[in-house]
Amino acid sequence: MADKRDYYEVLGIDRGADEATIKKAYRALAKKYHPDMNPGDEEAEKKFKEASEAYSVLSDSKTRAQYDQFGHAAFEQGGAGGAGGFGGFDFNGQDMGDIFGDIFGDLFGGGRSRGRTNRGPMKGANLRTSIQITFEEAVFGCDKEIQLNLKDTCATCGGNGAKPGTSAETCPKCKGEGRIYVTQQSMFGMVRSEQVCPDCQGSGKIIKEKCPDCHGAGYVAKKTKIKVSVPAGIDNGMSVRIRDKGEPGTNGGPRGDLLVEVRVARHPLFQRNEMNIYSSEYITYAQAALGGTVRIKTVDGAVDYEVKPGTQTDTKVRLKGKGVPSLRNKDKRGDQYVTLVVKVPTRLTKEAKKHLEAFDKACEKK
């Protein structure tokens, strides 16, 4: 037993891990190293058996307690565990099928289920779509209208999918359960797993005479106009949730929701970082040297700003409250940070050059 790795190390978990964590860790290793996924790979088969051995011990509270107290010696012949062989289990026999049945049901089709299938009211699936808005619309909010094909209950059959005058029958294969049990051979013996009934697709009902309008689906799709209220301050990639505009529920369950992803177009002047807006504004050489009033563009329109004499290029100024509103409090806004860039003229008249040369000489005098 001295050459055996610690079972917790094998599964990659802490000693205080709970049952769910142990099962999750083993499931990941079983999927990765199962011989069916790695045919002919002896190393993978060895790791699979090692992980399965660790799981069989740690998943049972009794054997785990023995292992925590005595280590691998607990399962040696005549050891403290009092069980021969592999912790009281025959690793090559049928006992392992009971231990791993629910996990291998997941791995080899159908998943597991403890008890009867839940066939009560279930909420419908959510739908997703997207809209494009401008930078300003994201800042101040807007209303958009979209058109989608939404499923509505079929008026002809009332949603049961059967032709008027007929009704759905209990599925004979699953007896109305929507699930069937399948026994499969694995390296641990026979494993019994639970799967969705292939005849009724899990509904538990068979419709022999389908509704002519919905063809047994119980719903029909039609184009529907939906208003999307985009809140002020929304950012690119965020979604607006519209309740009860998703897929219809089953067995009387509510509809799902519609999630509208908002895509904000780029702006030629403004850039956003959370609630703040960033931009650049050109000023003339004379404005930078002498100071004066300049007009700066904001999302609220142009505003006047007093430039100080001797302002250098790349000077940053802050316009308080000219940023993006908070999604939670529309009265609270971020700021706008403006980089002032001194614009150097590329074309000068003879007279302008003459004056500039005179200015340059004047600046050289002490």
Image (cartoon, rainbow, N blue to C red):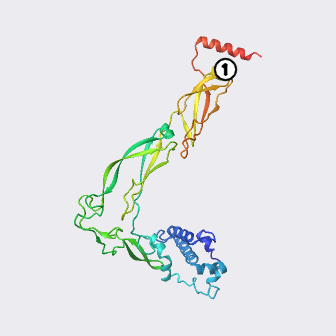
Note whether 159 is above or below 363 in the view shown: below
In the orientation shown, which residue stands out farthest toward the left?
165
In the orientation shown, which residue stands out farthest toward the front?
331
Q: Nearer the viewer, residue 283 or 343?
A: 283
The picture quadrant where one finds residue 108 is bottom left
Q: Nearer the viewer, residue 354 or 116?
A: 116
The x, y position of residue 176, in whole percent, is 34, 73
Residue drawn at the location 23% of the way across and 63% of the way down: 164
Q: Nearer the viewer, residue 213 or 195?
A: 213
Q: Nearer the viewer, residue 153 or 342?
A: 153
The picture quadrant where one finds residue 209 is bottom left
- Residue type (three-letter) at the residue carrying disc 1: Leu
Q: Look at the numbered disc 1 and give the secondary structure of its residue.
A: helix
Name the residue that disc number 1 marks: 290
The x, y position of residue 342, in whole percent, is 62, 25
Residue 165 visible: yes
The x, y position of residue 159, in whole percent, is 30, 61
Number of numbered discs visible in the structure rendering: 1
Q: Residues within 10 Å of mark 1 (few under 14, many from 20)?
A: few
The x, y position of residue 79, in whole percent, is 64, 86
Residue 343 visible: no
Note whether 334 is above or below 365 in the view shown: below
Quadrant (top left, top right, bottom left, bottom right) of the N terminus? bottom right
Indicate left or right for 250 with 313 as reference: left
Quadrant (top left, top right, bottom left, bottom right) of the C terminus? top right
Indicate left or right for 191 with 87 as reference: left
